[in-house]
Image: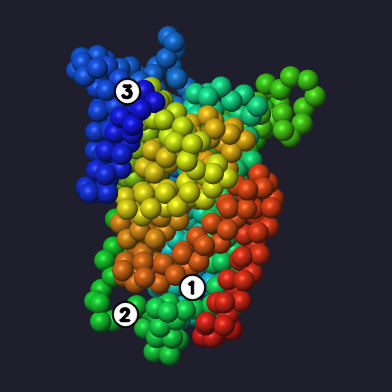
Amino acid sequence: MEQTALSLVPPILALAMVILTRRVLLSLGVGIVVGALMINDYAILASISQVAQIVLNIFYVDGALNDWELYIIFFLFLLGMIAALVSLSGGNKAFGEWAMARVKTRVGAQLTTVVLGIIIFIDDYFNSLAVGQVSRPLTDRHRVSRAKLAYLIDSTAAPVCILSPVSSWGAYIITIIGGILAAHSVVQYEALQAFLIMIPMNFYAIFAILLICAVALFSLDIGAMKQHEMRAIEKGELIDPSKGDVPGDQSDLPVSEKGRVRDLIWPIGALVGGTVFVMIYTGIRESEGPVSVLSIFENTDVALALLSGGLIGLIVALGLTVTKQMTLSLIGSGLWAGIKSMLPAVYILIFAWTMIEIIGELGTGTYLAGLVDAHLNISLLPALLFIIAGIMAFSTGTSWGTFGIMLPIAGEIAALTDVSMLLPSLAAVLAGSVFGDHCSPISDTTILSSTGAGCHHIDHVLTQLPYALMVAGITVVGYVVLGFTGSPLFGLLSALAAFGVALLILKQAARPVVRA
């Protein structure tokens, strides 16, 4: 059944189940089981043994601990604990109060939110909740609608995280890319280097951030967003009063009244600084010959760097929390809450790693590559993958689940048809996944952004959708040009030109509510 239409059954089944059930783990699990059964001629014990061996190899392989995967998992747990401690110590609240005394305009309040969303890039969950908690007192004071705040949060959370290698998203994606490169014997670059090369090709993330800056700076409010902004300015109604109270407006963890700005800045600074230091150190240590920036990134130990930075950030956060004279029981509850918040991400990661192995054994990508080679102009592959990944992420509400299914398929198609299209194809999947996640009403990031902003969920979905669709159109233009020219630079420049046209259209369609 290898390299035949039957090899499509497990991934299609997983996709269909995700759409119907909205349960990513169950759907991926069914796809894994069905794929294993097909590989082993439906022998149940052999299939169970294969899946068990794949999962075991995630933790223990060749007689030793698999430190790469284990370090990534530990890093995710550390991120959750840091986020919980920062909130517990009152760092988020203190930063919000500090900013209120210094930001005097509506535009300034919105741009401050955007800057915070860019700075707090370690995790989208942390970003959505922390930026919302920090910015809400500031934007409320300047009568910025909660729908606008939710858009500001959501359009900096995932796009920033997916562009940063020092984030939960970066760690997850780099790990999957590493498996894809190894599976296809691509040795001209390491996983981290490939991720960095793909950053300027992630057109959706780049232009989503640029558009949110333009919307905040020039008050480009259209449709439902303009209605919310006018209601906030003219009546002081930050949410639609006809829809009742906003659910999820309070955190389960108590917040210290002794919080200071440093309780937010120092842990994040320690995390980033520690990670970068260890990346440089290990890159220099493992480099052979002259040391350069490229050789450092080629030889650095990403997993060890992330783990080290996470431990340093946690120690700093823990030390600051202890100074607030909180009980050990309360601190322990915060740490456990942080760990639990990351369990879904860890589960998806493990299932995604297993799915990569199963799809590789089935030859799904080989079969699809043959179809593409025979019936599709390879130049359209990035644009097509962007659209497919967007539809999947929209239907499932998960970008990470989309990564797990679409990245290995896209990688194999590109590797077997035109290896020069490998990184553009992977970048298109990443971009499409974020796009679909932005539009989806069942996306966890969409829900958390609404919660962090104190906004009605459906209001956030409807006000953000026109902007997400506009950025998607810009992105398609970029990928079509990239595909036909083979030049990421030409693709980026064409998308930039389309972005300029979009801004002119927005300015004509929307009179700014206020320019203060």
Q: Quadrant of residue 367?
A: top left
Q: Position of residue 235 (x, y in %)?
A: 39, 89
In this view of the protein, can residue 34 be seen by the observer? Answer: yes
**Residue at point 30%, 20% (across, down):** 39
Q: Which residue is mark 2?
A: 240
User: Residues under labels 2 and 3: Cα distance?
Assistant: 56 Å
Considering only vertical position in the picture, is 454 above or below 418? below
Q: Which residue is mark 1?
A: 138
Sequence-wise first label, 1 or 2:
1
Residue located farthest toward the top when viewing the structure as drawn? 63
**Residue at point 45%, 20% (across, down):** 66
Circle 1 sits in a helix, a strand or a loop, which is it? helix
The three-letter amino acid code for the residue at tag 3 is Met
Considering only vertical position in the picture, is 3 above or below 516? above
- Circle 2 or circle 3, nearest the eye: 3
Horizontal side of residue 426 vs 439, given as left or right: right
